[in-house]
Amino acid sequence: MSTTTSLRSLNIDNINPRVKEAEYAVRGELAVISEEYRARLLNGDTNLPFDQVISANIGNPQQLDQKPITFFRQVLSLLEYPPLLEKEDVLLNQLGYKPDVIARAKWLLKTVGSVGAYSASAGAPGIKQSIATFIEGRDGFPADPKDIYLSAGASSGVNTLLHIICASPQTGVLVPIPQYPLYTASLSVLDAKCVPYYLDESKNWGTDLEAIKSAYKQAVAEDIDVRAIVIINPGNPTGASLSEEDVEAVIKFAAQEKLVVIADEVYQTNVFKGKFHSFKGALRSLQKTEPEKYANVELASLHSVSKGMVGECGHRGGYFELAGFDPLVQEQIYKFVSITLCAPVIGQCLVELMVNPPKPGEPSYELYRQEWDNIFNGLQERAHAMWEAFKDMEGVSCGKPQGSMYLFPTITVPPKAVEAAHKEGRSADEFYAHRMLKATGVCVVPGAGFGQKEDTLHIRTTFLAPGTEWIGRIKKFHNEFFEEFR
Amino acid sequence: MSTTTSLRSLNIDNINPRVKEAEYAVRGELAVISEEYRARLLNGDTNLPFDQVISANIGNPQQLDQKPITFFRQVLSLLEYPPLLEKEDVLLNQLGYKPDVIARAKWLLKTVGSVGAYSASAGAPGIKQSIATFIEGRDGFPADPKDIYLSAGASSGVNTLLHIICASPQTGVLVPIPQYPLYTASLSVLDAKCVPYYLDESKNWGTDLEAIKSAYKQAVAEDIDVRAIVIINPGNPTGASLSEEDVEAVIKFAAQEKLVVIADEVYQTNVFKGKFHSFKGALRSLQKTEPEKYANVELASLHSVSKGMVGECGHRGGYFELAGFDPLVQEQIYKFVSITLCAPVIGQCLVELMVNPPKPGEPSYELYRQEWDNIFNGLQERAHAMWEAFKDMEGVSCGKPQGSMYLFPTITVPPKAVEAAHKEGRSADEFYAHRMLKATGVCVVPGAGFGQKEDTLHIRTTFLAPGTEWIGRIKKFHNEFFEEFR
Ligand SMILES: Cc1ncc(COP(=O)(O)O)c(C=O)c1O
Ligand SMILES: Cc1ncc(COP(=O)(O)O)c(C=O)c1O
């Protein structure tokens, strides 16, 4: 076990091998290099062929163009410094705070006490109630605060759920490929089996029930104890937004095979085409029509303040809701989240604001609506501009934008580029992405970071960065790349 | 593996057994009952023998009396709503913000961009630099920002470190007993071995090198791969504050046996007797005198905004600093923390404020100093009041308060109470704590929750709650308990 020759206790050969195996490309080598470039530019280095680094590798809206929603941040400022509430006239008449901002801050302070105090382990009770009300409004079915757990972003919710589910190295979890690598990384760390099922690129990256079934069957044949299925809707990296039928089909399959459904719905408001169908709503509908069949389906659905028009990634707010879970299992979930005490309380308050924003007629409503619409329209426009650009590029094919914050085009590079990549010990999409970063300062993530069918290559890019000049830079690079390796 | 008769995928018999085994009494059954009492009182229930619940089970200062430090919260309010910075005259002349508050907020915003953006995985570079400067000032030895990792409270830092260290079920970590149960719980979840070493109650709960050595030897004899030693200084639950010699002795032992030292120093400013001796400072001193001997000692030291006079638990801010770690191991730590993206950015900013508070001569200094001193003196007074009360109680013995936020008295209950406890399937200290909660509304944690030598019984109580009336309630209960079971 321990390397007796080493001078230290820990070295790369004796630390936790499951951590070593985990891969998380969103913040991998390319991201590190891009930060080096950024530092060089900051220090006045003029030897780079670009004057700006664009982090299109990560859905981090406020790092780029997106401004926070005024109502949210005004409330948070009062929560951080409650003595401001003693100066209502200054707030109202000189600082432009509206009465509903003040009222909400007072209510939240009553609910949490101080944002500097640990809350109850699963979150402040009043905030859980607001979330339940939101879910009821969204789905048209009741929700119970006791089934809601606040988390530090959806990431920490996923971590909790997988910790409970993964009981042995033979535990399997169905994960879509391509996927947001939090799932594969967490399963590696937990020493459980990722059971990949491929999404159908030819159907705009929808779920393909046949692919799910055959992945499941094969895993079972290999003695894997498959217990859960992850769905990311709208998709990351794919941008796909599932139809109601697709959602129902997954639930039916889960009911039949007794699988926990983990519905990652952090992009639920980032939908450009059609509408969002929540798993919770679909489950309750199915339960209404055929109670015996669906009564025991276990669903965990996740949401976050990081995405949507909220875009408050740095605040690390999120929640998950459970449906159909055994109360004894829920007790263990409670204990597990207790170990790290509670989710950040300001993040919890932001979740409350997200699910309970100003309503028509309230003083802050108009500005809220306007800010929301501007962000939504801006994202949609840039998604389309980017998609148009990809359509024009040689060897690139890309589905029309549907949702989330990403495009995930297929790229077919010339064979010479594949050769050159292998010489560097890289896959062709990694090679392409490295070259792009070096030439343009734009950081994207190669498809390899999310998983992709063999012999296909992709890149994932966000469409969050302002302007379209950088999209032009990508086009120019792409043409030169093809010239070089044709 | 799976229980074929169950209707669900998950049940108490098939979920992760390592989560099930984990124990975390600080938020266990007693805490749950206390919350029920609190809810009953809120709803106007008058059938309880008390009219207030006192959560003395958890070091959560702002849930009780402690007010946040004004400077910190003023800066945070500006970070949450930066447009306030455009109204400097209102801030200065009508809201009582000082120029250094404004300057700091501007600097932090430049450093993090927006508090709503994900930061770099290990934390915002400017904040890491401030922490390094603080450590240099505290210890008199340089610190390097690249060795500093921001975390969501110290809890998440401990989680990261143990994830890296625990490579197999045979990995062992020396943990003081009694201890803050984060350590044993995390080792359970990670399926690694807790190697307990007992602290010496007769020496005011100091470390006892002989006890450490014999625990280590015994573990090695059992083929446990002991890799690290945890020290909590000042101690939780014990309140002990270690002497420089004790700190050095641990480092020497770690150097000799090649163990990573995990120094949990979240209570470093909660010292009432003598002064705090940091492990980092002691290590650098030893390295200066005998470089060959101590060059390769690996140390991880943790700090947090939750404790001290800051008491900002809900903000989930903290950091750990590494010394002597292999760069390849540090790369894996970076990757691991990347998977959950970053620590809460407002929490990171609060860490910056904690380590870089107003200095003498600066506009906010005087108030800051005064608030700090008031909190410090209040804690010290209440610690002594409580200690005096324990001195008077039959069967109770308690060391003089030294540090942290807790007293941890030994309680010797009458044999009849032990019998009654066993009839309820509880240990005698659990029984005593349940009875106390029921009679007084004061929630403490039985020593069993932290570990204690066989045949000894303790309770842990914070001394954070305002006033001393509740201490009187405890005394009265105690007398009645002894009358009943004598
Ligand atoms: C699909 C998906 N789930 C979860 C997350 C985690 O987000 P957070 O932890 O910030 O809520 C992300 C972040 O990009 C994501 O894309
Ligand atoms: C010894 C010790 N370490 C770590 C922690 C964790 O604190 P936090 O995660 O809030 O920083 C605590 C909390 O009580 C503690 O007592």
Image (cartoon, coloured by chain):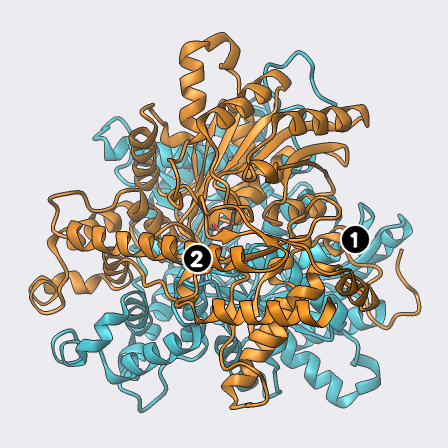
Chain colours: A orange, B cyan
Q: Position of residue B3 (x, y in %)?
A: 69, 17
Q: Is mark 2 within 8 Å of ligand 1?
A: yes
Residue B370 lies, in percent from the top left, at 29, 77
- Find residue B156 and report its horizontal and vertical position in percent: 56, 56
Label 2 is placed on what type of residue? Cys
State which quadrant residue B371 falls in: bottom left
Q: Residues within 10 Å of mark 1 (few under 14, many from 20)?
A: some
Mark 1 residue's CB less than 8 Å from ligand 1: no
Chain bearing mark 1: A
A177 w.r.t. A59: above or below? above
Between B410 and A127, the one lying in front of the other is: A127
Tell me what residue is drawn at x 29 percent, y 49 percent.
B469
- Occupied quadrant, residue B436: top left
Q: Is residue A375 above or below residue A360?
A: below
Callout 2 secondary element:
helix
Q: Which mark is residue B466?
A: none
The reply, left or right, for residue A411 in relation to residue B438 is right
Q: Position of residue B195 (x, y in %)?
A: 76, 51
Q: In the image, what residue occupies the spot 15% across and 43% down?
A: A360
Task: Check disc 1 and report its element: helix, strand or loop.
Answer: helix
Q: Tag on residue A17? A: 1
Residue carrying label 2: A313
